Image (cartoon, helix red, strand yellow):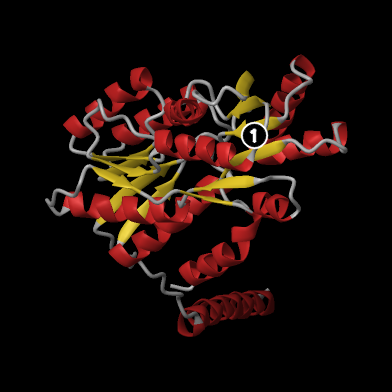
Amino acid sequence: MKKKLVYSIFALAFLISAFLMFFYGQQTFYVKKETSTTEPKYDYHFVLIPEEEDNEYWRQVEKGARDAAEKQGVYLEYIGPKRANLNDHVRVFDKEIAGKVDGIMVQGLSNEAFTPLINKAVEKGTSIITIDTDLPESRRDVYVGTDNYMAGFMAGKAFIEDTKGEQMVGIVIGRNDAIHQQLRVEGFKEAVKNELRIKIVGMKESNISKTGAVQATYDLLKENPNITAFYGTSALDGVGIAQVIRTMRPYSDPYVITFDTLPENIQLLEAEEIDAIVVQHPYEMGYTAVNMLVELKKGNHPEKIQHTPTSIIRKNDLNQFLQEHIQENNK
């Protein structure tokens, strides 16, 4: 009986010793990983709200904005509708106003929908830049972007210069409810109104998507088979127009002018499936907009209208354009 008791005591002591060795050994040899609590310090918090989040044009705007934000010590958010939709755009904008950020860059797509929100944001102390599309009637601080009416007028003048004889024009508009798209159509119409040989025979909406542009072009041709030219007012319209012509009318040669130097548009210009492109500068828009917001937050008063350059390029201009584009990216 005594032996059993002794053995039990020894066993218990051994277990206690082993436990203590294991526990203190862990404490001795365990090195706690230090987690850094230091976060980058930002002077301001800005938000860029695109018309459509994963759109090539808006990604270029975002790149310019992020480059400027990095230099200026700004925390930048990029958030918008997954697909172009006015109601979704308004909801995102309203939510960001409630978040009390320092500044917001947003399109002025609709006077009725956006002016009250812009005014509310300004009253709350949030600086507002309208980018790409202006609402001069609102209390926005600065507009940064294309003169959209003039861009449409330039497109019309280019069309007059590049064509001869009677022309039946189909317009593919990005969005019927967007002010900048309307201005591009108005400018084009103004430029060609005195040209009796040019007639606008129809207009369809693409909803700024490639599939939408394909459907719009198909519908225009179905309703107006005598169309000889197309004018696209948003970045993906030319791609959709060219696709339909390639598949439905491969032996025809309509004149096509559209907006924006996206890679696919450049390829189509080189292949002569697009005749001319209205060049905007989305990278510069984003870059300038962030800098203007910083100026506003510092108490400065920049010019309220900051128009970015607009030009027309044709196939003959491509080499020079691409060289200049490379130089800009290397700055």
Q: Residue at x 37, y 50 (%)?
A: 308
Seen from the viewer's position, the closer of residues 293 and 204 is 204
Q: Position of residue 9 (x, y in %)?
A: 59, 76
Q: Residue at x 58, y 65 (%)?
A: 322
Residue at the far top in the pictured view: 223
Q: Position of residue 199 (x, y in %)?
A: 61, 21
Seen from the viewer's position, the closer of residues 151 and 19 is 151
Q: Residue at x 37, y 31 (%)?
A: 108
Q: Is residue 158 above or below residue 186?
A: below
* Tag 1 residue: 209
Seen from the viewer's position, the closer of residues 218 and 271 is 271
- Would residue 257 be found to the left or right of residue 311 on screen? right
Q: Which image quarter holds the N terminus?
A: bottom right
Q: Position of residue 179 (x, y in %)?
A: 42, 26
Can residue 276 be seen in the rendering of this structure? Answer: yes
Amino acid type, label 1: Ser
Seen from the viewer's position, the closer of residues 126 and 152 is 152
Q: Is residue 42 above or below residue 61?
A: below
Q: Is residue 261 above or below residue 199?
A: below
